[in-house]
Image (cartoon, rainbow, N blue to C red):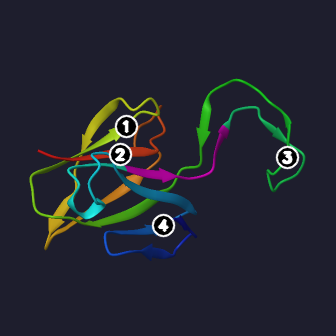
Amino acid sequence: VVVPKGRTIGSKVLTVKANNTFCTAGAIAVDHKVLSESGRILLLHLTDVCMENLTFSSGDKRIVTHWTKGQLLARRGTADFTLTLSPGKWKLYALQSTGKRLKEISFAYKDGKINFKAQTGIFKNEAVFAYELIRQ
């Protein structure tokens, strides 16, 4: 889903509130189960992302006039994620863009709901766009 700044959009399983900028958010079961019963979920939190020194024909960023190679840049943003999932012992990891686990992230679990704050700028030199939620 694309969530405008300050808005909350949700479904039976996933609700996302975009705090300080718009975001694209998603939850994908990667173990071939329905999302509410999954034991391994990829969570996405994407803000405005592009390569450094990329140039556009106008401010709306629809037409690229100069392609470049460089560091991936991301607008700093936070979003509150709530997932309604079946009980279990859960762990949440922030991921590199390669999929490698960076660090375990804390979250709250109450009344069958997992709540955490996704942050693109959680680490100083590494933008985070994805998280892995696993049931142990």
Circle 2/circle 3 CB separation < 8 Å: no
Of pointers 2 and 4, the one earlier in the residue sequence: 4
Q: Nearer the viewer, residue 73 or 67?
A: 67
Q: Is residue 40 left or right of residue 77?
A: left
Q: Residue 82 bears which disc, if any? A: none
Give the image location of residue 104, x and y in percent: 24, 40
Q: Is residue 104 left or right of residue 75?
A: left
Instruction: Say which amino acid is labelled 4.
Output: Asn
Task: Sort mark 4 into few (<14), some (14-19) or many (20+) by Cα contacts within 10 Å.
Answer: some
Circle 2/circle 1 CB separation < 8 Å: yes
Q: Residue 19 bears which disc, if any? A: 4
> In terms of secondary structure, where does tag 1 sit?
strand
Q: Residue at x 67, y 25 (%)?
A: 70
Task: Sort mark 3 into few (<14), some (14-19) or many (20+) by Cα contacts within 10 Å.
Answer: few
Q: CA distance from mark 2 to mark 3?
A: 30 Å
Q: Which residue is mark 2?
A: 131
Of pointers 3 and 4, the one earlier in the residue sequence: 4
Q: Which residue is mark 1?
A: 95
Q: CA distance from mark 2 to mark 4?
A: 18 Å
Instruction: Say which amino acid is labelled 2.
Output: Tyr
Q: Residue at x 46, y 45 (%)?
A: 129
Q: Residue 63 bears which disc, if any? A: 3
Q: Which one is in front in this view, the residue at disc 2 or the one at disc 4?
A: 2
